Amino acid sequence: MIEVSLRPAGKCRATDDKQTDLQMKRFFGKYFPVIPVGLVFGTILFSHSCANTTTPPSGGPKDTIPPVIVELFPYPGATHVPVHKTQLEFKFNEFVTVKDQQSIFLSPPMEKRPKYKLKGKSLVVSFENDLDSNRTYVLDITNAIADNNEGNMYPGYALAFSTGHTLDSMMITGTVQDCNTLMPMKGVTVMLYKDQADSAVFKQRPVAAGKTDDWGYFCLRNIQDTVYRLYAVKDDNNDNMYQAENNELVAFWDTLIRPVTVVKDSLPEVIKYLMTDTLACLARKSEYELNMFRETPSKQMIVNKERLGERTAYITFMAPYAQIDSIWIKDVPHEKLITQFNLERDSLEIWVNDPKKQPDTLFLYVNYMKTDTLGQLVPFTEEVKLSKPRTLGAAKSSSRDIKKEDTTAVFTVTAEPETIEQYGFVIEFKYPLVTDAFDSLDFWYVNPKQQEVKEKYTVTKDSLNLRKYVITPGVKLLPGYEYFLKIPHRKFVDINGFYNDSLEVKVSLPNDDKLSSMTVEMTDVKNKYIIDLLNEKRDQVLRSFTIESDQTLLFPYLKAGKYSLRITEDLNRNGLVDTGNLLGHKQPEKVKFFKLEDGTFLIDIPEMTELQQTIDVGEMFK
């Protein structure tokens, strides 16, 4: 039993008002997040009054309690609600404000969003058009309301009512996450369609919808007991449909679904928790897990072009894997043209291998498969005009205006102490080479006794970047040694006819005694997998491996902190994390994160630790 002691209305004092309000808010916020109309406590709460009620006294504890609903209209679960000029009213125990109008969400959504006004301590919601007859609606105000003084957010409430004789009573739950990071996605619109056509999500509004919370969690309540198709859309323009041409993120469930749970306000999945209540939020049952992805465009055409310099330009295509039959530039011999696609074949770099001055405009012709007005790929020859940048044509007035790249074959060398053993020395030239002399490089080390020893090395040309080369030492690298790579002067010539400057790079393995390492044994590997070590936020790849068989991976030189291991199943073996396709019913490639025995995904690595993990890949992806 809960006992409440209230001061008689005629004997309150102004100095006690604020303390009394806070005590009452704590009580009602804990036991009655929403109080139905007519409940006696709603009347008692506002029964005390004093001479000055508009200016609260200063001092006292800070208000940290969210607002509480004390009256509702219509009553939750009401039927026969009028369809014309319908108004819904939420009366709170204090003055409130609307923090986010988009979070006042009606399911099923209408063409125009709900309107609202604040009237005293009430939020009044109305609609521009009539509601449909004989239909169940749910108005959700989660993440929309805060108190007027301290900005304490109201956890939320979903008011279900019907314009017909009965109220639909089923529900489904689930979570929405990013397909690559598996991080929860907030504010995603989850949609149900009775229409089973693949095009329904493009052309119609759903028959039921809801928004995900901070945990990516959704609960679609008071829906019919029937079969649906389930989608999730990052609805950037708030039209409650999927706009693929706007690059909106999307997710879908592979099969038809049917709800099996009856709505009860006492269910944890229905209750609106504060998002800071981690245990309660994580304890909610999730029936469906949706992975959001951005589709690759289906229409193929050239969408961008730019001439970057005298002899270099690029074009980009709308869709990946462009099919080019031939490419040429007017008045440029075919053998003088150098081209390179990126891995996804949606961007093409172009160079003219001729040091003489080029015209102000290059006329590029691309014969490729382009999407026509009927959506079919047909052969098409397109002319692309590549104009020289204005800054390139400006004359150099003095030697001070001449940059290094104007006379020299520019290149960079990357050699990181933490990754030198795995990636080696990476040399990347700004322009393709016409003459190289990698056998002229010098590689040596200096041991702790200051003895200098020359060593061998191997050179590998990057398969995806013809301007990049990897220099791999022919000796095992050791702590305490200094390793040097020297690129001699005037040994390389690029397409501009420029020679290189000399450069010497020194690198040593990290010698911080506090660094740790992790060894991961990958077992039961039956496909091709991409293994990434990520930071705690999962927004940075620190190391990456590609494996096709059982293998032991070493992650050395790790600072104390939290890390996660991402394993991506590369079924088509193209070295990419492929996205999904909605109309093709193709989900993005499967991504899993290594889960520890305690159920967490973060590997906590202390200082000066040699950690060992074993991952059964076959079990993880079965």
Image: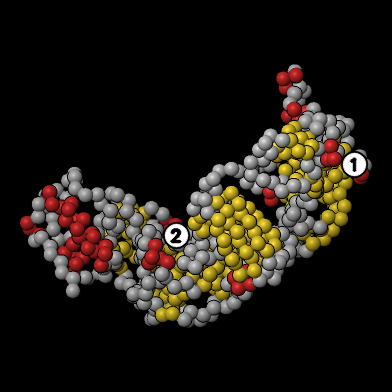
Q: Residue at 69% of width from left, 59% of height from top?
A: 546
> Residue 273: image x %, image y %?
36, 64
Q: Secondary structure at mark 1?
A: helix
Quarter the C terminus occupies: bottom right
Instruction: Please rate how many residues cluster around mark 1, counting C-alpha atoms within 10 Å: few if below 14, some from 14 to 19, many from 20.
Output: few
Q: Secondary structure at mark 2?
A: loop
Instruction: Please rate how many residues cluster around mark 2, counting C-alpha atoms within 10 Å: few if below 14, some from 14 to 19, many from 20.
Output: some
* Nearest the eye: 502 or 169: 502
> Residue 577: image x %, image y %?
67, 60
Answer with left or right where residue 170 lies relative to residue 304.
left
Q: Residue at 32% of width from left, 53% of height from top?
A: 152
Residue 37 versus residue 486 in the image, above or below: below
> Residue 370: image x %, image y %?
79, 57
Answer with left or right where residue 23 lies relative to residue 289.
left
Residue 207 versus residue 375 in the image, above or below: below
Q: Which residue is mark 1?
A: 336
Q: At label 1, which amino acid type do we have? A: Lys
Q: Residue at 67% of width from left, 40% of height from top?
A: 481
Q: Which residue is mark 2?
A: 214
- What is the C-alpha distance between the residues marked 1 and 2? 55 Å
* Nearest the eye: 161 or 412: 412
Answer with left or right where residue 144 lies relative to residue 199.
left
Q: Are marks 1 and 2 in contact (CB under 8 Å)?
A: no
When asked about the image quadrant of residue 549, the answer is bottom right
